[in-house]
Amino acid sequence: MKNEVYQGKIKKYDPEKGFGFIGSAEGDIFFHISDFPAAEGEPKRNERVKFVAVKNGDKYKAVRIERVADHSAKAKKSKVSTHNQSITSALLSNFRG
């Protein structure tokens, strides 16, 4: 792995221990919560990220992690479903009140 930007998904995160793993094309890579953007909340499983990999002993560690907008078909379907639920709730509240 070179000092370039890679992409992957959060595979696992343990909030008690403060670390997790990102699944990428190059394999699973360790990350520590201190390298994650704290202002945006804790990482969630399957969340897309980009990062730089640096040598950490005999393995690699993800640093300078950034969230990436998920433009996959599954994410779009989920957004549409959430939007439709909010519209339905709004319409139903008009009938009830």
Image (cartoon, helix red, strand yellow):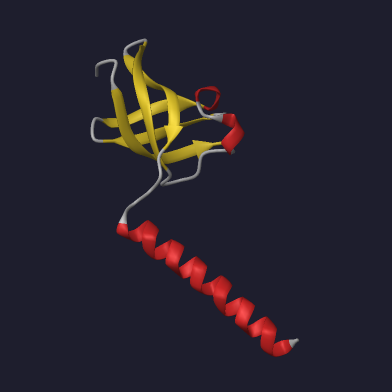
Q: Is residue 80 left or right of residue 86?
A: left
Quadrant where the N terminus is found in the figure: top left
- Look at 56% across and 29% down and name the residue there: 18
Which residue is pictured at 40% across the width and 36% down the height?
Answer: 49
Residue found at the far right of this picture: 97
Residue 8: % across, % down: 33, 37
Q: Is residue 7 among what the camera can see?
A: yes
Q: Quadrant of residue 53?
A: top left
In the foreground, 94 or 19: 94
Q: What residue is shown at x 39% (from left), y 20% (from top)?
A: 61
| Residue 16 visible within the image | no
Along the horizontal axis of the image, is 14 left or right of 81?
right
Front in this rendered view, residue 60 or 66: 66
How many circles with numbers are drawn on the protein? 0
Query: The C terminus lies in which quarter of the figure?
Result: bottom right
59 up-or-down from 23: above or below? above
Residue in the image at 35% along x and 60% along y: 74
Q: Quadrant of residue 22?
A: top left
Image spot of residue 35 (x, y percent): 50, 23
Whole-percent x, y for residue 50 in the image: 37, 32
Farthest-out residue, top: 57
